[in-house]
Amino acid sequence: MKNLAETKRLPIMAGLLIGGFIGMFSETALNIALAPLTTKLGVSTGTIQWLVIGYLLMVGILLPLSGLLTRWFTTRQLLIFALCDFIVGALIAALSSSFTFLFIGRLIQGVGTGILLPLIFLVALAIYPLEKRGAAMGLIGLVIMFAPAIGPTVAGLILGALSWQYIFWAMIPFLVIALVTTIIFTKNVMPITRPHVDALSICLSTIGFGGVVLGISLASDKGWTSPIVLGALVVGIVALFFFIRRQLKLPEPILNVKAFAHGGFSLGTGLVMIDFMIIMTSMYLLPIYWQKGLLVPVALTGMLMLPGGIINAVVSSISGRLYDSFGARMPAMLGFLVSIIGALMLFFGNADSSYLYVVFAHVILMIGAPLAMSPSQTHGLNALPQQLSADGSSIMNTLQQICGAIATALATSLLGVGEAASSAAGAAKVASGTRFGFALTVGLAVLGFLLTFALPRKQKA
């Protein structure tokens, strides 16, 4: 498949990229609408959070099983199912007038995203030769990084002019285009081996990853010491321990965790996790800072976040090509260094900061984070032999989603701590809270920068 001409590779990737974009867009687009939805649906803040928690839960459960699915079903079958599933979920959400049906729609969408995300990387690794993988990962980075960055902007504009249901209506035309493209162009890129399905491993995976995601997600609302949170985390971690132990012994594991024996993969995965946490903390805290710290209306909030989203897209599209030319070390190191500057600017913001200052800080952060993302992903996945590509993609995407949930929960906790510690009131109190949250963003950027020193100085042939 790697000898395909570029004109044939792009149509094969088109359906995956569009579907992946909508899946990642859906992760953050609803965040800006959660506050209005509590009033319109007549539910509490704790209840409305389940629209995010349920989505992440389904993604977290499906991602570890993606390697197994690609060995039982063709790429085309999986992609068609995932896109149809997402369309059904979006339709249910768009037509719903109650929390229950909206929640069901979100769960169905989570299934589609859980299948789509690892497929993007798997197909790219299969059809692009080694010397062009950086550019391919840059294209994928454009999807993975730009979609959650642009989500609040688009959702804010929709909420300013229309009802919240149109957030889901807007997804459907793109999903239909992706489905038609897939039916016409997509081919299978992995051998169908139909390995033995270990039911116990699937149960342990579901309980383990589901428990961890559930516990972390609930922590943002109930606190880290809540019995429900601690119970979910303990059950999840114990189940994951036995899951990993079983995978190491099985001749045909559900998820081959031996991928971590490759140092380059472990380092690349770690950098991707940190980078994604930087994105998720900023995407969670910025709308709160704009709306409650600077008292900006929801529609204008979306517009003020647009420059950062556009810059994110531009940098994502070129960062992979930098890997092809210079390897991972230089662009990743520079990316995290720039992220430190942007995160520090947001940290020093307050209730009196100018709009231009906050927009500029966001733009700088959106230069740094995508600059580090694609080279780190490519370095990690290139370190694996072909037979571990599916497992590596599943592991990287699973941990990325879990770390995204961790980052959001930690940012929420720090936001509350900052507000409680502040003697101010109103907007100044919220701005003080977001400063505590942005301290996490700064710390993550510094940690990522220090880890880049472990990357090889030159790209290996």
Image: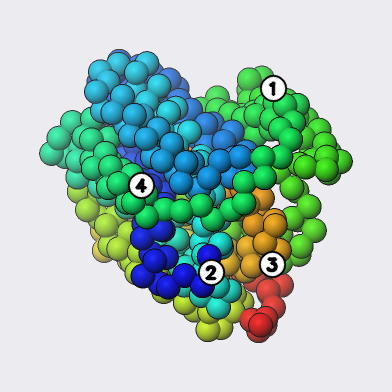
**Residue at numbered disc 3:** 383
How crowded pointer 3 is (Cα within 10 Å; few <14, some 14-19, many 20+) is rated as some
Q: Is residue 390 above or below residue 323?
A: above
Q: Report the quarter where the C terminus lies.
A: bottom right
Indicate which disc, 1 or 4, sits on the residue closer to the N terminus. 4
- Measured from the top left, where is residue 159 in percent x and y? 20, 37
* SS assignment at label 2: loop
State if disc 2 and disc 3 touch (CB < 8 Å).
no
**Residue at numbered disc 2:** 2
State if disc 4 and disc 1 touch (CB < 8 Å).
no
Q: Amino acid at mark 1?
A: Gly
Q: CA distance from mark 3 to mark 1?
A: 36 Å
Indicate which disc, 3 or 2, sits on the residue closer to the N terminus. 2
State if disc 4 and disc 2 touch (CB < 8 Å).
no
Label placed on residue 231: 1
At horizontal 58% and vertical 58% (from top left) the residue drawn is 272
**Residue at numbered disc 4:** 183
* SS assignment at label 4: helix
